[in-house]
Amino acid sequence: MLNKIRWLVAVAILPFSLGVFAQDNFYKLQPGDLLVISVWGEESLHAETPVRPDGYISFPLADDVEASGKSVAELRSALAGKLKKYIPDPVVTVMTMDLRGNTVYVIGKVNRPGPFQVQRQIDAVQALSMAGGMTAYASANKISILRRDPNGKQKSIPFEYGDIEKGQNLEQNILLQPGDVVVVP
């Protein structure tokens, strides 16, 4: 009985503890994200699991389930579908505990270079802001964004901050993807 009360309290405060981000279905899970998954009324079906490098998670009775690229709602639905073989109408809860997979990097002549774990998609200007802005010696019009395609091939995307300051070529202020590196020479 005590476990059911704890579960009810957790479900009641979940939207408030996870904030607006938990409500957003646009975030796609990435390898490295840490999840807590449970099934209502099934104490043995509770697990804290990372999204593995191959993009899958393991969960009792469901075996391996692809999580990478899915929203929390999509993963919850996929798990419920697999569990229906064993549990009639399973109520599955999926919570994101740590979004380690959504990391972007800013290096070079910025005030605070390094990795930044983000809870939503950000663009290049927002990443520069998170890094404390550029130093006085930065070449603002020679910034590049390094991105790997699904095959591992890297490409460089030019970014001219001077144009953004003038309100020009705003389309170059692209949304960053997990693993992108913003290089400020």
Image (spheres, rainbow, N blue to C red):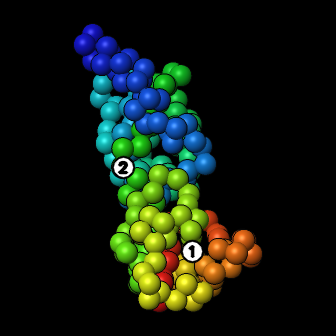
The answer to whether any part of residue 82 appears in the image is no
User: Which picture quadrant has residue 9?
Assistant: top left
Question: Could you tell me the amino acid type at mark 1?
Answer: Pro
The residue drawn where x is 44% and y is 84% is 136
Question: Could you tell me the amino acid type at mark 2?
Answer: Asp
Q: Secondary structure at mark 2?
A: strand
The residue drawn where x is 31% and y is 42% is 48
Q: Vertical placement of 57 versus 73: above or below?
A: below
Of marks 2 and 1, the one in the foreground? 2
Q: Residues within 10 Å of mark 2 (few under 14, many from 20)?
A: some
Q: Is residue 4 left or right of residue 108?
A: left
Q: How many numbered badges does the structure rendering display? A: 2
Quickly name the residue at label 1. Answer: 150
Quickly name the residue at label 2. Answer: 98
The residue drawn where x is 41% and y is 68% is 132
Q: Is residue 155 left or right of residue 168?
A: left
Q: Position of residue 165 (x, y in %)?
A: 65, 74
The residue drawn where x is 64% and y is 69% is 174
In primary-sequence order, the first of circles 2 and 1 is 2
Q: Position of residue 169 (x, y in %)?
A: 74, 76
Q: Position of residue 116 (x, y in %)?
A: 40, 64
Q: Position of residue 172 (x, y in %)?
A: 68, 75
Query: Quadrant location of the N terminus?
Result: top left
